[in-house]
Image (cartoon, helix red, strand yellow):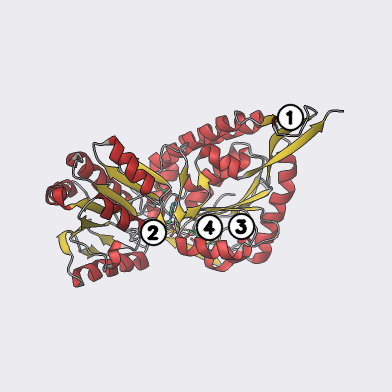
Amino acid sequence: MFNTEENIYGNLLNGKWIHNKENLIHIKSPINGELVGSIHAMSREEVDEAINIAKKAQKEWALVPTNEKSKILHNVADLLEERAEEIAKIMVLEIAKDNKSAISEVKRTADFIRFTAETAENIKGESLPGDSFPGFKNDKISIVTREALGVVLAISPFNYPVNLAASKIAPALMAGNSVVFKPATQGAISGLYLAKAFKDAGLPDGLINTITGRGSEIGDYVVTHKDTDFVNFTGSSEIGKRISRITEMKPILMELGGKDAAIVLDDADLDLAAKNIVAGAFSYSGQRCTAVKRVLVTDYVSDTLVEKIVEEMKKVTYGSPLEGNFTVGPLIDTKSADFVEGLIKDAVDKGATLLAGGTREGNIIAPTLFDNVTVDMRIAWEEPFGPVLPIIRVRNMEEAIKIANESEYGLQSSIFTKDINKAFYVASKLEVGTVQVNNKTERGPDHFPFLGVKSSGMGVQGIRYSIEAMSRVKATVINLK
Ligand code: NAP
Ligand code: G3P
């Protein structure tokens, strides 16, 4: 039984929904505080059981032909599409994502899973002749293939509880691994609906096992567990750095925080820049790692760009996701809203020009725009994960690059210019994983490499990259005598 009449959700262990009504965590909606459902806070012993199940099931799964794995994942994708509206309803209540964006996330996840299955079917090995290296004869050949790692621990963030879970689970499975899935607590029910789709689609028992509970209580234990063979984590830089410290030699893949800059040069198309900056900064209330989180604009065009951004912001709607598909809604919790409000207050106290927003109603912060932000203000450097956009005016392109690179983060940046040479020059100088030319910062399409450097992450995601990250090379050398 997936959930009880009182909306207590079980954990998927060895193909069964297991309920434990002790130590319940009651998940309440950020919209109105109403109970969405309850999950069990697992003990270490229960985590051990989940990992042991995954370890046993993985051995057989690694031997299943890729084309059979692929069929199962296609079934998962089909089920997700059928259930998109049902799952979206939960997401709206659980993470205050608007219904349209929630449905889009589920459908994007179905596409992701299909593309992952097809990509895995086409991953090739290689063979290397020995005599291409000096001193060797043509009597050696290395056959290079890939092997699974074992048990992958998938830890997902609240803001994409379905997509950023599947972005770990699907490639892990196609690479021959089994999965222990720890969803974000606020978003756990949405994540359990994803796990249900895998089970209902015919994934053999034990290949995906969920572990619900607060990361602060079971996180360290599960990431350092002797039978966790790989950690695939998406979340804050603070937690990511902690995981990196305590996992020692364990292979990990991490997508962390960001402070993505939109750099606007003298020759930019300012209408295009304003439209992309506003869309990139405020969608899902700015609760995206790839949100535009600062604008660096050259003095020559700054007045005009600011005017255009102010105009564009007038189209940014905000309100309760129960009443419409608003761009901005309640932040995930009061602590987050308090943090964002603190950044706003700091900017005002230090003399930034407030051009829009700056107000709060409950956990809804009105879309907020600051001009004349200076580098002594917290909003210039900290990740708000909320609907606040600072504009920093710079003298020239070189100063924009300097300030952009002084951030501890290095996820993405945008560069707006009509000069392709300048675009490539700036891109070559920026310490980030991805540079968007004349577009907002964003992760999709999902087969593109997606990575953060510095405090924004370790390793590369993106479908093929994820499959390769969660598998290892095996070289078999044939010695011909
Ligand atoms: P978070 O607080 O770091 O939590 C992320 C996940 O880690 C949750 O499942 C959380 O569980 C778990 N966790 C907490 N403490 C842990 C520990 N000690 N060991 C292992 N896991 C632990 O992040 P969030 O609030 O969900 O997401 C917002 C942050 O994630 C932002 O900084 C954002 O930039 C970043 N993010 C980055 C990307 C990207 O692709 N680069 C995407 C989305 C979000 P609980 O929920 O139970 O605490
Ligand atoms: O924060 C989630 C990150 O993966 C952003 O995805 O598609 O909104 O750019 P996207």
Q: Residues within 10 Å of mark 3 (few under 14, many from 20)?
A: some
Q: Which mark is residue 8?
A: 4
Q: Residue furthest front?
A: 135
N-terminal of the pair, mark 3 or mark 2, is 3
Number of marks drawn: 4
The percent coordinates of residue 151 (x first, y second) are: 67, 50
Q: CA distance from mark 3 to mark 2?
A: 22 Å
Q: Residues within 10 Å of mark 4 (few under 14, many from 20)?
A: many
Disc 4 and disc 2 in contact, CB within 8 angstroms: no
Report the amino acid beneath label 3.
Answer: His
Rendered view: 110 above or below 149: above
Q: Which mark is residue 29?
A: 2
Q: Which residue is mark 3?
A: 19
Report the amino acid beneath label 2.
Answer: Ser
N-terminal of the pair, mark 4 or mark 2, is 4
Q: Which residue is mark 1?
A: 131
N-terminal of the pair, mark 3 or mark 4, is 4
Q: Which mark is residue 280?
A: none
N-terminal of the pair, mark 1 or mark 2, is 2
Report the amino acid beneath label 1.
Answer: Asp
Q: CA distance from mark 1 to mark 4?
A: 64 Å
Q: Residue at x 21, y 48 (%)?
A: 316
Camera sees residue 41? no
Q: Residues within 10 Å of mark 2 (few under 14, many from 20)?
A: many
Disc 3 and disc 4 in contact, CB within 8 angstroms: yes
